[in-house]
């Protein structure tokens, strides 16, 4: 697997070395409060999905990790072997006053290949499959509705898994914020894996483009009214 090859090279060349700027950026991560919510997604390489979802407005933090298996606290090597039942996944903490779960799903779909049931992009195997881990009936219903819409937009059956939430285990520290710690190796891996090329093929002319739900617009209007009232 290309990803594993890149990992081996990265460890041999400069294991654990990253810039002070990247370290400082991670230390300044916003605090999580009881009003924030979490969502867990799998989309192939967690370096990439973590990096993409961190850019979404309303997202507080994203951590790379493993979920879906039956072994507690698995290592990267164990999950990569494809024998633990885990998927590479990310845990997203977000502010529901700024972004809804439904909108977060829209962003998720645009950063995966929903038609691939054998992995994602150049990473093959069940441990790299795309999946949505729902925490309750409301999230399950939202995921099913979103999946059905994506199937209509793409005109094909969606292969992305919808799975009941299981324990999420954070990956090793050197995986967290990988795109910032190792920008050159990350860009090389991402380009050689064909991730962006495939997503462009799927989504460039489609109308999903993360539409803003009415409830999010209402939140924005309320904030605008509050601001005008204080002026």
Image: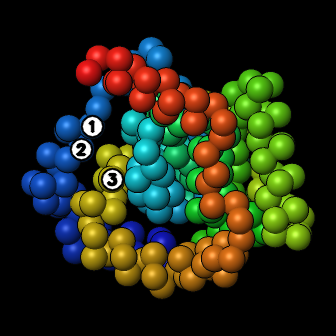
Residue pointed to by mark 3 = 177
Q: Is residue 23 above or below residue 185?
A: above
- Label 1 crowd bin: few (<14), some (14–19), many (20+), radius 10 Å: few
Report whether 85 appears left or right of 7.
Answer: right
Measured in 3D between alpha carbons, the distance from the residue under mark 1 to the one under mark 3, in whole angstroms, is 11 Å
Find numbered disc 1 in the image and state the secondary structure of the residue it sits on: loop
Residues at discs 1 and 3 in contact (Cβ within 8 Å): no
Q: Earlier in the sequence, mark 1 or mark 3?
A: 1
Q: For residue 175, which quarter of the picture? A: bottom left
Residue pointed to by mark 2 = 26
**Residue drawn at the location 57% of the way across and 36% of the way down:** 217
Residue pointed to by mark 1 = 29
Q: Is residue 38 above or below residue 116?
A: above
Find numbered disc 2 in the image and state the secondary structure of the residue it sits on: helix
Report whether 113 appears left or right of 191.
Answer: right
Q: For residue 197, which quarter of the picture? A: bottom right
Of 172 and 229, nearer the camera is: 229
Farthest residue, direction left: 20
Measured in 3D between alpha carbons, the distance from the residue under mark 1 to the one under mark 2, in whole angstroms, is 5 Å
Residue 167 point in image, percent of width and height = 60, 30
Report whether 123 appears left or right of 73.
Answer: right
Measured in 3D between alpha carbons, the distance from the residue under mark 3 to the one under mark 2, in whole angstroms, is 8 Å
Image quarter hosting the N terminus:
bottom right
**Residue drawn at the location 65% of the way across and 46% of the way down:** 105
Report whether 214 appears left or right of 140.
Answer: left
- Label 3 crowd bin: few (<14), some (14–19), many (20+), radius 10 Å: many
Residues at discs 1 and 2 in contact (Cβ within 8 Å): yes
Q: Earlier in the sequence, mark 3 or mark 2?
A: 2
Residue 162 point in image, percent of width and height = 78, 44
Of 153 and 36, nearer the camera is: 153
Residue 49 point in image, percent of width and height = 51, 57
**Residue drawn at the location 28% of the way across and 70% of the way down:** 183
């Amino acid at each position: 697997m290309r990803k594993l090859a890149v990992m081996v090279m990265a460890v041999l060349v400069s294991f654990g070395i990253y810039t002070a700027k990247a370290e400082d950026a991670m230390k300044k991560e916003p605090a999580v409060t009881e009003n924030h919510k979490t969502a867990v997604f799998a989309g192939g390489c967690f370096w990439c999905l973590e990096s993409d979802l961190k850019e979404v407005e309303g997202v507080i933090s994203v951590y790379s990790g493993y979920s879906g298996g039956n072994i507690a606290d698995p290592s990267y090597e164990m999950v990569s072997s494809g024998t633990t039942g885990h998927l590479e996944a990310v845990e997203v903490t977000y502010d529901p006053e700024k972004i809804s779960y439904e909108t977060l799903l829209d962003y998720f779909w645009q950063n995966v290949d929903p038609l691939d049931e054998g992995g994602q992009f150049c990473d093959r195997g069940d441990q790299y499959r795309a999946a949505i881990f729902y925490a309750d009936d409301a999230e399950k219903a939202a995921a099913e509705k979103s999946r059905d819409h994506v199937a209509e937009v793409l005109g094909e059956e969606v292969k992305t898994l919808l799975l009941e939430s299981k324990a999420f285990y954070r990956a090793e520290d050197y995986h967290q914020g990988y795109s910032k710690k190792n920008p050159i190796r990350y860009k090389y891996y991402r380009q050689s894996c064909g991730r962006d090329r495939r997503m462009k093929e799927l989504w460039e002319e489609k109308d999903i483009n993360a539409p803003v739900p009415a409830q999010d617009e209402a939140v924005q209007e309320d904030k605008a009214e509050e601001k005008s009232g204080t002026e």
